[in-house]
Amino acid sequence: MSGKLSQLKRYLHETLGVEVCPTRWDEETRLPVFLRNLYTFFGVQLLEASCLLMLDKKEQEQSPATIRKHMDQVKARWDGEVVYVRARVTAYNRKRLIEHKLPFVVPGNQMYLPMLGIDLREHFKKLRTETHKFSPSTQALVIHVLLHGTTKRIFTPTEMAGFLGYSTMTMTRAFDELESSNLGDIFLEGRERCVRFAKPEKEIWAKAQPFLRSPVKKRFHIEPLNADLPGPCAGLTALADYTMLAEPANSVIALSGEDWRSLKQRHQVNEFPSREPGALEIEVWSYAPSLFAKGKVVDRLSLYLSLKESQEERVEAALEKMMKGLQW
């Protein structure tokens, strides 16, 4: 709790230029037990206003309607303003808190204190306008939704973790990225955090472009192996499969980092310093290419991202034709 208080004090100092000295509220012991389990209370003088900080202790986010009920119970014993404080609040609930006119502070992101005429969102807006590339797990989530035509469905982190093979915690962070990018609608349904993509697939794909990156982390050129490789064809080999483009002289195979390491452990892999005639090109991807492969070929969306920086006109034309073949 001391860490949360330090963040709050620093945020108030940086945004309002005031030093605050929170003190534990003596009357807290007279509150119902369930309120004491949910919150910690500190009295503070904020711009000449006597305020009671209601610090949320739980990891699970509560609805604004519930917070209002709790605030009303606290106000029965506090002669002043009550301010809800939480380390992180979804954009959906921030909006609802403001609609309910409930004072709140999210240190580092937003401050809404209507009784003081303060509605400070500058830092939050700054974060939203910066374009940060998605992590591999977030990009995999977006591609899964687009390829499976499930933009109208509602997903939870646990469900997406099951689909994609990531941990629930990793999917929770992916939801955070979606929320920051305004790409998905994040909301609570009961006690579960959910995401829904309300727009058509083509519109989501266009809006996601600034956040998406090539899945290719590294490329290697190796002597062909007398073994089946555990990955789909990629690069120009895959583009030739989707279009009338001529197949490249060097076949391209996509592997996950784990499959690439396993391949080198099981076989004698001879690497070339550069592309050699007849060499096999290996692309090591940031997420498993087999997740979305169509048969033995990587999916169109990931392939597009891996080749879109090509300066060759024939490749650009083939990519455009391939994308037109998508059924959305």
Image: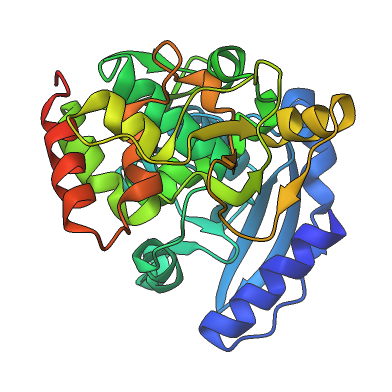
Residue 57, x across and y down, in percent: 74, 40
Q: Residue at x 19, y 29 (%)?
A: 243
Q: Looking at the figure, which quarter contains the C terminus?
A: top left
Colouring method of the image: rainbow
Does 325 sit left or right of 301 as displayed? Answer: left
Q: Is residue 186 visible?
A: no
- The front one of 74 and 234 is 234
Q: Is residue 241 above or below residue 313?
A: above
43 on left or right of 120: right
On the image, the x and y values in percent for residue 242 come to 25, 25
The residue nearer to you, when weighing 151 against 321, is 321
The location of residue 201, given as percent across then percent down, is: 20, 28
Furthest toward the front, the residue is 277
Picture coordinates of residue 129 (x, y %)? 34, 66
Q: Looking at the image, is 109 positioned above or below residue 35? A: below
> For residue 311, which quarter of the picture?
bottom left
Residue at the (64%, 29%) spot, across then down = 60
What residue is drawn where x is 72% and y is 27%?
259
The residue furthest bottom is 17
